[in-house]
Structures are given as C-alpha cells and as structure tokens.
Amino acid sequence: MSSASAPVYEQVKTFVRTQIGLGVWVSGDPVPSESALMHQFGVSRMTINRALRELMAEGLVRRVQGSGTFVAELHQVSSQLTIRDVQEEVTERGHLHATRIVTVETLRAPQALAQRMVLRTGQSVFHTVLIHLENGVPIQYEDRYVNPLAAPDYLKTDFSQTTPTRHLLDHAPLTQASYSIEASLPSAEEAKLLGIRKHEACLVMVRRTVSASHVASLARLVYPGTRYSFNGEFQA
C-alpha cells in the first residue's frame, strides 16, 4: 500500500525503514541530514525531527550530537513480525478488501515442495493462488500450499469472503512460523496479475507456518513495492 496518504512523518519513517530493510543503508551508515530530508519531503524540521526521534526510540537509528544520525547496530535488535490477515489490515484502514481467485486445486507434492513441508513426495497438498485488492487495487499476490492433515476443510472455504490466513488461524492454530523478506522483481505472471510492470520492484515474503506436529502452510506473498510497506516492532 502506498504511504502517500499517511502523515508525512510516517512517510519519512517508512522511507528510512525501507532503505535499511533493503540493505541500501547498513549499520553505521549516515542517514541523510535533517536539511536533506526537509528538502526531499518538503516539510519542516520539526516533522523530520519527530520521525528521527521515533526511529531512534524503535532502535533503528542512533543520533550523535554534532555528527548526525546513523543506522543502528541492527544485530543488537530483535524483530517481531505479527502474522496479520490482509483483509483485517485493509478494513482497519477504512478501505474495501476484495479477493480475485486465480487457482484452487489439489495436487501431488513434487520432491522440493514435499521436503519443505515435511511430506512424502507425491502426497496430496492443497494449492491456492489469490490476488488481494484494496479499493480495487491489487496489493498482494498470494501463492499458498496447505497440508490437508493440518487443515482438511481448507478448499471448502469461500475465499471471496474469508482469507486463507484467517481460515488457518481459526482451524490450524499457529505454534511456530518462519519467514524471509527480500526485494525481487516479479515473475511475468505475478506482474500481470498485480497490474504492474515487469521491472517494478516488489517485496516478497516466503512464510512457513507450523501447527502442532504438521507444517500447515507454505506461502509466497508478493507485494508491489510502491503499494505496500511492512510495519513491525523492534526492541533492544
């Protein structure tokens, strides 16, 4: 989701977070000066100061009197990513969520997928591909595999009304999760379904969830970089 409608100080924070998250700025690198950020965003020093103060409180940057602002030593920072239902996120913003259903099927797990989901090669898995929209604009491409042993009624879900995330949270209670986030170009199919250009950068999350003794799902979530930003909590 684009941050254009957010308060300007939040736009500044998102800009700084994104540069750090993508590795453009690394620990110890200087953050642009207050004057440079004022010029870039066309706002007052007070607004820039607020953004930098809040980023410092979150542990993302450190400010050195007389020298400027620098990216913090992020290996000393732990992050927590809450698994959110995209429908709830959109609704909380006061916007309209909709889902475009692309694929709903059962297939036999090839070897690579079976290994990642701790299944036998050829074992049945559920597969869905959905596009999530906010006010009619695609913001997420969701390609998900689900273990029938963890969520046997998954394919009975009306995905125009309930998201896969919500179904899994309700029927396959989460006991563990792992994820990775990286900047990447979309595949031709992803670009087409998201309505973006092939060379437009995206944020890609690959997330695996575990419920009790089963790997419940493996999902690839693709977000157009100009339409969405991740928000989390950081604590020293």
Image (cartoon, helix red, strand yellow):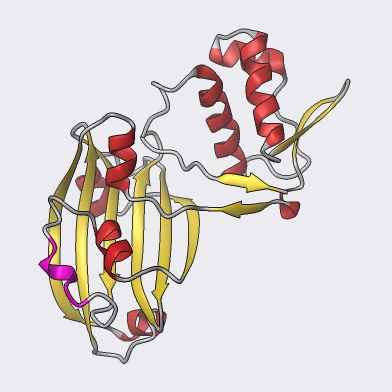
Residue at (71% x, 33% y) in the render: 56
Horizontally, residue 131 falls left or right of residue 229, namely left
- Looking at this view, is 18 or 235 the one in front? 235
Quadrant in the picture for residue 106: bottom left
Q: Pinpoint residue 75: horizontal percent, then vertical percent.
A: 73, 54
Q: Pinpoint residue 50: horizontal percent, then vertical percent.
A: 65, 20
Q: Is residue 179 visible?
A: yes
Q: Quadrant of the N terminus?
A: top left
Q: Pinpoint residue 40: horizontal percent, then vertical percent.
A: 57, 15
Residue at (16% x, 73% y) in the render: 153
Q: Is residue 81 above or below residue 15?
A: below
Q: Is residue 195 visible?
A: no
Query: In the displayed image of the protein, which residue is found farthest to the right?
Result: 66
Q: Pinpoint residue 118: horizontal percent, then vertical percent.
A: 39, 85
Horizontally, residue 210 falls left or right of residue 12, namely left
Which residues fall within the magenta stretch? 152-157
